[in-house]
Image (spheres, rainbow, N blue to C red):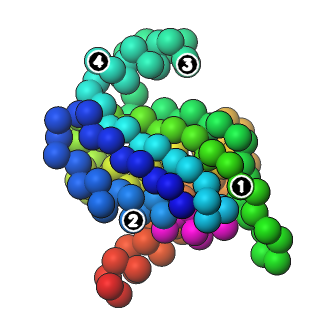
């Protein structure tokens, strides 16, 4: 898997940690081992500009997902499709605020947003109640598995 993490936010993001998380989530979702992903951490001005340009929304947001080859999770006993998963853009300062409000801190919030973003790249959405239930349930499951993996290593 090719996972590129760029910290353009000036926050000192632990790129190794987030590379390991992305690889873990992609492995759990049976994404092709040669799939490509780029995650960029940015400041509020940059994500607000991207949010306006691509989502037609005003102001900063926490994460933006830009799928490329419309890859989907692999199925058991089937070879997953090879290609470019896409790009994620994270805003560390927004994550910091949200993590404080949620009571779990910045690292946990950035882990959640990374997982959430990868699920979006894999075609998951949460616009409808049933979609929301499926996506957030899977997100919670992946994060619990990630934390168990970290505790065991």
Disc 4 to disc 1, how far (Cα)?
34 Å
- Bounds of the magenta span? 24-30
Q: CB of mark 1 within 8 Å of CB of mark 2?
A: no
The x and y percentages for residue 83 are: 68, 49
Return the residue found at the far right: 78
Q: Secondary structure at mark 4?
A: helix
Q: CB of mark 4 within 8 Å of CB of mark 2?
A: no
Res. 100 in view: no
Asked if residue 26 is among those painted magenta in the image, a careful observer would answer yes
Q: Which residue is identified by label 1?
A: 82
Q: Earlier in the sequence, mark 4 or mark 3?
A: 4
The x and y percentages for residue 127 are: 67, 35
Q: Residue at x 27, y 40 (%)?
A: 7
Q: CB of mark 2 within 8 Å of CB of mark 3?
A: no
Q: Residue at x 35, y 87 (%)?
A: 152
Q: Earlier in the sequence, mark 2 or mark 3?
A: 2
Please rate how many residues cluster around mark 3, counting C-alpha atoms within 10 Å: few if below 14, some from 14 to 19, many from 20.
few
Whether residue 5 is situated above or below residue 89 in the rendered picture: below
Residue 55, label in figure? 3
Disc 4 to disc 3, how far (Cα)?
15 Å
Q: Which residue is identified by label 2?
A: 20
Mark 1 vs mark 2: give the one in front.
Answer: 1
The x and y percentages for residue 64 are: 48, 33
Q: Which residue is identified by label 4?
A: 45
């Amino acid at each position: 898997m090719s996972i590129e993490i760029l910290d353009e936010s000036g926050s000192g993001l632990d790129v190794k940690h987030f590379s390991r998380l992305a690889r873990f989530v992609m492995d759990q979702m049976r994404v092709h081992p040669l799939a490509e992903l780029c995650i960029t951490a940015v400041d509020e001005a940059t994500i607000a500009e991207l949010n306006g340009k691509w989502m037609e929304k005003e102001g900063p947001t926490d994460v933006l997902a830009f799928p490329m080859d419309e890859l989907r999770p692999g199925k058991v006993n089937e070879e997953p499709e090879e290609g470019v998963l896409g790009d994620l853009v994270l805003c560390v300062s927004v994550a910091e605020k949200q993590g404080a409000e949620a009571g779990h801190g910045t690292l946990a919030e950035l882990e959640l947003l990374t997982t959430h973003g990868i699920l979006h790249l894999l075609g998951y959405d949460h616009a409808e109640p049933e979609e929301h239930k499926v996506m957030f349930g899977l997100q919670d499951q992946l994060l619990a598995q990630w934390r168990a993996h970290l505790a065991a290593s």
